[in-house]
Image: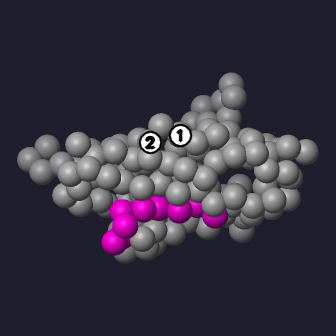
Amino acid sequence: QVQLVESGGGLVQAGGSLRLSCAASGRILGINAMGWYRQAPGKERELVATITGGGTAQYAEYLKGRVTISRDNAKNTVYLQMNSLKPEDTAVYYCSAISYAGPQGYVELWGQGTLVTVSS
């Protein structure tokens, strides 16, 4: 079993920055793409950014320029640097990963989420 554990969330003032981390642990056979999603209160979960194993990143258009996704393959960890945070960025941020599960093929994994609260 592979688990994803996020960290780095918290309370920050508008205009501030946060760096989220998500580490995969367990019986890791291989991890393909990793990503970050978020879910604000009363809203559906939405994409923030994804990154391939080779480091190609894609971002939600509305967040471009304010967030940077990166990963350390040796540590099976993905990061999300968020700058110029706004109150509307308040949400639970979830990490996802496409993990190779052997004969089962690839499975999508989710972390438990980390809360980011941006105060005005």
Q: Which residue is mark 2?
A: 111
Q: Residue at x 37, y 74 (%)?
A: 54
Q: Is residue 11 above or below residue 54?
A: above
Q: Is residue 17 above or below residue 48?
A: below
Dot 1 amino acid type: Gly
Q: Residue at x 61, y 53 (%)?
A: 8
Question: Is residue 76 covered in magenta?
Answer: yes
Dot 2 amino acid type: Gly
Quarter of the figure with residue 20: bottom right
Across and down, in percent, residue 12 comes to 79, 50
Across and down, in percent, residue 27 comes to 21, 51
Query: Does residue 49 show up?
Result: no
The foreground one among 10 and 78 is 10
Q: Is residue 68 above or below residue 36?
A: below
Q: Alpha carbon of mark 2 to alpha carbon of mark 1: how far?
A: 5 Å
Q: Residues within 10 Å of mark 2 (few under 14, many from 20)?
A: some
Residue range in magenta is 73-81
Q: Residue at x 8, y 47 (%)?
A: 103
- In the image as oriented, which residue stretches furthest toward the left? 103
Q: What is the count of numbered marks? A: 2
Q: Decide if residue 28 is on the left or right side of residue 53.
A: left
Q: Residue at x 68, y 25 (%)?
A: 42
Query: Does residue 81 show up?
Result: yes
Q: Do the numbered discs 2 and 1 sit on residues whose CB atoms are within 8 Å?
A: yes
Q: Secondary structure at mark 1?
A: loop
Q: Which residue is mark 1?
A: 113
Across and down, in percent, residue 100 comes to 21, 53
Quarter of the figure with residue 55: bottom left
Q: Residues within 10 Å of mark 1 (few under 14, many from 20)?
A: many
Q: Decide if residue 96 is on the left or right side of residue 7.
A: left
Q: Secondary structure at mark 2?
A: loop
Which color scheme did the rendering employ for the protein? one colour
